[in-house]
Image: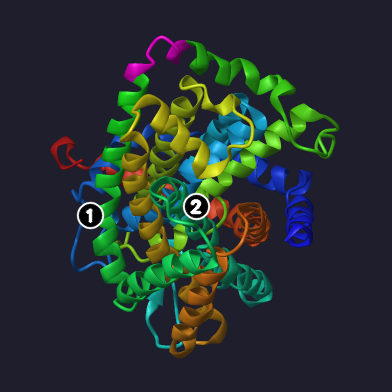
Amino acid sequence: MEQLNSISEKFSSLAWGIPLLVLLIGGGLYLLVLSRFLPFRFFGHAIKVLRGKYDDPNDPGEISHFKALTTALSSTIGMGNISGVALAIAVGGPGAMFWMWVSAIVGMSTKFFTSTLAIMYRGKDSNGELQGGPMYFIREGLGKNWKFLAIMFSVFGMLGALPVVNVNQLKQAINDIVLIPNGVEVSLSTNLIIAAVLVIVTTIVVLGGLKRISSIASKMVPSMVILYFVLVLIILVINYTEVPKYFMMIFTDAFDANFMTIEGKKDVFGGVLGALVLLGIKRGAFSNEAGIGTAPMAHGAAKTDEPVREGLVAMLGPVIDTLIVCTLTALAILVTGVWKIDGLNGVSLTASAFQNAMPGVGQYLLMICVFIFSISSLFSYAYYGKKCMSFLAGAHNKQYYNYFYILSIILAATTEFEVMINFIDGIFAFMAIPTMLATILLAPKVVKELKIYIHNLKTEKPNDR
């Protein structure tokens, strides 16, 4: 296991270097400037679109704007918001959260562009059905000479869609919160039982296809965000005297890497500050997946003939996911002081924060959130993986991905957390390369589409907006 952990760590470090950082953050800033910050000025309009004001049942696509966003959020609002944030703080201290915020703000622009492209350049699969996603906007938007990027995305997309981190941390939460405190001896057998239950639940849902997944996600996502928000709010109220201090520390410690506890601190920019920046960006990317390419696969299925509308809805994702949910997790961990305890990491650290603030019930309430977060992510990731398989091997073969997916659930339940998180980090990096390159190349066409949309919006009557 130590050797496997070492290999996965080297793989992640190799993928996450300066070139990828420049591509994700530099590329996102370029998109932000290119659009003259226009998406942010239409934040209120995006809410109206999300609420269904512009829905038309006759538009092409499978699901509504709201269901597209909740399907995308059901994969991003997962263990990245609980274990990912905990890992970032355990390794990099409060300042890591600041760089996650940077990732989210830039990611809003990235998601706007990638999801707009997912509607602009929808393509047909081997069954003749309309599909959206990076592989399709690469093929349809850039042409056949760039198809190698679409293939690259799909290959790594099948691996990146494996729910290994969510399953691993759900297993850990069940062990730490439910089994061990009640005297149950945790073993390979108990981990396999957990995996078997998850396989059964996931299979029942994913066999129903996107409409069943989106229908369940549209009900689960809002409720789990509200529940989590209320629970963390209780923690912050209990520790209200600590909130201002730690909120300020997120800013002050963003440029002070004294908290860094990882080895190899001189990999990026030649110092620990660079390693802290990279840690925050990496955890931010894992949390909101902006620039990775997963969200455009969900938003590409939206029922609309206006690409910009879906792009505006998609940009709400990083706001909800990172700026709200991840910030809540970070503050809960910081104000309770558990982040200073050695040996705690991932979901175990977050569970300690809840137990510290609400003894006896806190960790069980978190268990409910963890379960809902993880289960909803399992459904969406299965859809993403099958979509990548469909592009590579034909729509008639996509069901074979289910076997690969089920095997990964069993593997994740019996493997160390560090191995799984390093594996997904590395795979996400290789998914981001084709997604961001294609998005930057096609960005001028999105800006042109945006200007037309804004012009048409301004010519409408005020009561029609």
Task: Say if 444 sits above or below 305 in the image.
Answer: above
From the viewer's perspective, is 378 left or right of 109? Answer: left
Q: Quadrant of the N terminus?
A: bottom right
Amino acid tagged 2: Gln
Q: Position of residue 449 (x, y in %)?
A: 43, 52
Task: Say if 309 sits above or below 302 in the image.
Answer: above
Q: Please give the name of the residue rendered at 32% of the width and 26% of the height, measured from the top-left corner.
A: 233
Amino acid tagged 1: Lys
Tell which of 359 and 255 is nearer to you: 359
Q: Please give the name of the residue rendered at 64% of the width and 31% of the height, measured from the top-left corner.
A: 342
**Residue 306: in magenta span:** no
Please state the extent of the stretch shown in magenta in the rendering: 237-244
**Residue 242: in magenta span:** yes
Q: Which residue is mark 1?
A: 219
Q: Which residue is mark 2?
A: 172
Figure quadrant of residue 260:
top right
Q: Position of residue 382 (x, y in %)?
A: 44, 70
